[in-house]
Amino acid sequence: MSQLPLRAQLASALGRTAATLSRATGRGDGSVIGGRVGLMLEPDLLRQLAADRRLALVSATNGKTTTTRLITSALRQLGEVATNAFGANMPAGHVSALSSAKEAPYAVLEVDEKYLPEVLDTTQAGVVCLMNLSRDQMDRAGEIWLLAQKWRRALAAQSTLVIANCDDPLVAWAATGSARVTWVSAGQRWREDSWCCPECGGPLDRKGVDWACRECAFRRPTPSWVLDGEDVIDPRGQRWRLDLQLPGQANRANAAIALATVAAFGLEPGHALLGLREVTSVAGRYTTVERDGRSLRLLLAKNPAGWLEAFDVADPSLPIILSVNAQGPDGRDTSWLWDIDYRILRGRPVLVTGERSRDLALRLYVAGVPFQLCESFGQAVAVLPPGRIDVIANYTAFQQIRTEFGRAE
């Protein structure tokens, strides 16, 4: 890789020092503060750090942290990979990730949906992965149709190769702005945000996985990679059994996107799967922690689509603890709770906690789901007898629980 200019070297070094001090003093993992310091000293630092690397950007409403981890795990067979493993997915986090592995020839960066156009323009990434778009933090990100439009314009201005989920109409519409697209059929369980055509506004007709606009020519693109149950079918028609350690349909979809992405880097599926199968948890997601004879499995769900996937993974025979906050990173508006069908929880013990536990309690009451309201997560755990327990929490509630267990990985 080419040598950074002196100013960029100094900014990068001071950023790494700030990150180290943040970790040493217990104020954080350093994945944001280091980048902020670096960008203050050299506003062009992200572009300079990204230059001369083979770089993939990963963006979606749900699954981008996991998919980033899967791609990174596979690509490490080719060489060192710079990545924002802790999910700091805005420019400061990207600077920290690239600065901490400044000699890595490869980089895989998770990117917040709102920041994707800016980061793509700055880094000139060779590959962009787009998986899904649904309502999330509406008070911050705004309407997802507008977000898809911004993606489309940004991709049309670049020669980037786009790896896109053709089963999500909004993602497909955004990706058609690019001249180079690899289509992946990764599925779309949550469809409540994509019943209308993003091209003309007409109704979308659906038949199985296929969809097409009733009013214009916009329809589902033909995929070259297909997720079929436990298998992924590659462009040559060969089947590859995933055998992931991560649970659920959503993670199989993430893996299909990951396989298509690493293929663009020249890594064959047979070799890539070795890396994908090594991933057992992602930033605490799916981790099992122990307390007083209780085994708690931690699941993250931040929005209606994410809760649908969490219910798919949760064991219906186990008691479940639900925790909801509404801090800045979560979005202040909890009205999205009413878009989730909680009736699937009937018949199992349900405990409710978190800063906005009463919002969730009202939603469960209306859905006819019996529950017990608890003042703290610790109280909820103590109420249940020893054994296995599932825990579903939104973002800051999830991080608080992780911290309580020593930032479980």
Image: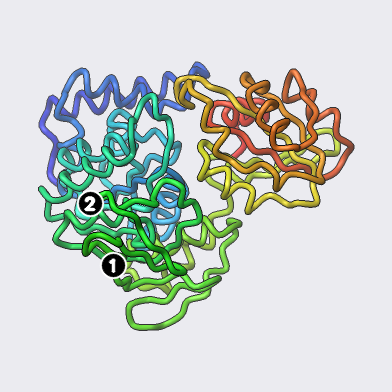
Left or right side of 363 for 283: left
Residue nearest the observer in this picture, 136 or 64? 136
Left or right side of 136 for 285: right
Give the structural element (helix, strand or loop) at label 2.
loop
Tell me which residue sits at (70%, 37%) in the image.
367
Residue that sits furthest to the right in the current view:
385
Q: Residues within 10 Å of mark 2 (few under 14, many from 20)?
A: few
Place of residue 72 in the rendered image (x, y in percent of width and height, measured from the top left)? 39, 53
Give the structural element (helix, strand or loop) at label 1.
loop
Place of residue 284 in the rendered image (x, y in percent of width and height, measured from the top left)? 58, 40
Residue that sits furthest to the bottom in the current view:
237
Tell me which residue sits at (33%, 78%) in the image.
235
Give the residue number, with chain letter if any, for mark 1: 221
Give the residue number, with chain letter if any, for mark 2: 200
Left or right side of 178 for 134: right
Closer to the chain start, of discs 2 and 1, is 2
Left or right side of 404 for 192: left
Q: Quadrant of residue 263?
A: bottom left
Instruction: Specify how the rendered protein is coloured.
Output: rainbow
Disc 2 + disc 1, Cβ < 8 Å: no
Q: Is residue 129 visible?
A: no
